[in-house]
């Protein structure tokens, strides 16, 4: 049964937003890396962004 996100409880709404923000960050950083390349100067930022994204996705899984 599908429910509109406005009618979800606070925990499931946080879970949904955490997952999608994490997924978009991972997708965007990898598309950028494939299209532009990843110079050594951007390696740390790429790693940190992906670790934050994974943390958000884990939060979403725990809060579901």
Image: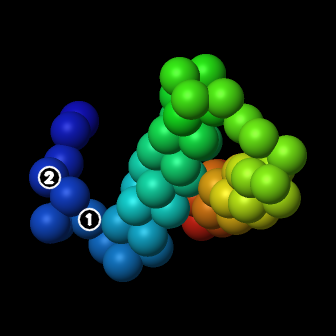
The one of 29 and 58 positioned closer to us in this rendering = 29
Q: Residues within 10 Å of mark 1 (few under 14, many from 20)?
A: few
The one of 64 and 44 positioned closer to us in this rendering = 44
Left or right: residue 49 versus residue 14 is right
The percent coordinates of residue 18 (x first, y second) are 50, 61
Residue at 56% from the left image edge and 29% from the top image edge: 36
Residue at 63% from the left image edge and 62% from the top image edge: 56
Q: What residue is disc 1 on? A: 8
Q: Residues within 10 Å of mark 2 (few under 14, many from 20)?
A: few
Left or right: residue 37 versus residue 51 is left
Q: What residue is disc 2 on? A: 4
Q: Secondary structure at mark 2?
A: loop
Query: Are dots 2 and 1 in contact, CB under 8 Å?
Result: yes
Specify the quadrant of the image occupied by residue 59.
Answer: bottom right
Indicate the quadrant containing the C terminus: top left, top right, bottom left or bottom right: bottom right
Alpha-carbon distance for marks 2 and 1? 7 Å
């Amino acid at each position: 049964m599908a429910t509109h996100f406005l009618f979800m409880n606070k925990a499931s709404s946080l879970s949904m937003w955490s997952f999608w923000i994490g997924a978009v960050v991972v997708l965007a950083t990898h598309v950028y890396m494939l299209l532009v390349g990843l110079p050594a100067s951007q390696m740390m930022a790429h790693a940190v962004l992906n670790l934050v994204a994974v943390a958000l996705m884990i939060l979403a899984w725990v809060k579901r």
